[in-house]
Image: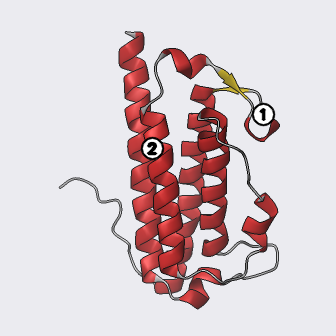
Amino acid sequence: MQGEVSGLFIKYSADKLRQMSSHVEDCIGRLNDHQIWARGAASENSVGNLVLHLCGNVRQWICSGVAGAKDVRDRDSEFAATGGMSAADLIARMQTTVAEAVGIIEGVSAQRLTDQITPQNHHVSVLEAIYQVVGHFQQHTGQIIFATKIFTGDDLGFYRPPK
C-alpha cells in the first residue's frame, strides 16, 4: 500500500509539473518581449520574473534540497530582472529546470519521502518539499495564465469540460 501511494504521489507530482510547464510555455509563446517583462506597478512581477522565480524555487527545493546540488539561488535577482531574456531563453531555462526536477522526483523512493531536508531554511520532509514545489508552480502558473489572458484577450483553452 505504501508503495502504491508513494508511486501515485511521485507520478502525479511529476505529471503536474510537466503540465504546468507546458501551460507557461504556451503563454510565453503568445506574448511579445514587452508583455513578458511588463509590470503594472513597481510592486508587481512580470511574467518573466515569475518564470525566473519558478526556476529558482524548483532548483532550490528539488535540485538542491532533494538531490543535494549546491544551492546557488539569488532570489532577489529573479524579481529585480526587467528584461534581457527572450521568450526562447525563458522557455529553455524552464524546460531544463523542470526536466531536471522531474527526473529527481521520479527517482525518489517511498522510503526517501520521509527524509528530512532543509531548503530555504525550512525543515521539511522530501514529500513536503515536492508538494510545496508543485503547489507553488501551480500558483504562479495561474498568475501567468491570468496575465496572458489580459494581454491577449484570448481564451487559452487549457481547461475544457468533457463533452
Nearer the observer, 155 or 71: 71
- Can residue 145 be spotted in the picture? no
The answer to which image quadrant residue 37 occupies is: bottom right
Q: Residue at x 70, y 44 (%)?
A: 70
Q: Please state if 120 lies on the left or on the right of 142 as rendered.
A: right
The answer to which image quadrant residue 5 occupies is: top left
The image position of residue 66, as x and y in percent, is 61, 33
Q: Residues within 10 Å of mark 2 (few under 14, many from 20)?
A: many
Nearer the observer, 16 or 151: 16
Report which residue position mark 2 lands on. Answer: 102
Q: Earlier in the sequence, mark 1 or mark 2?
A: 2
Q: Please state if 129 lies on the left or on the right of 45 as rendered.
A: left
Quadrant occupied by the C terminus: bottom left
Query: How many numbered marks have been drawn onto this rendered protein structure?
Result: 2
Element at label 2: helix
Q: Return the residue found at the far top.
A: 1
Q: Residue at x 79, y 73 (%)?
A: 80
Marks 1, 2: nearer the viewer: 2
Report which residue position mark 1 lands on. Answer: 122
Q: Return the residue found at the far front.
A: 70
Q: Residue at x 74, y 52 (%)?
A: 72
* CA–CA distance in space, label 1 to label 2: 21 Å
Element at label 1: loop
The image position of residue 97, as x and y in percent, is 52, 55
Q: Please state if 38 lies on the left or on the right of 98 as rendered.
A: right
The answer to which image quadrant residue 20 occupies is: bottom left
Amino acid type indicated by mark 1: His
Quadrant occupied by the N terminus: top left
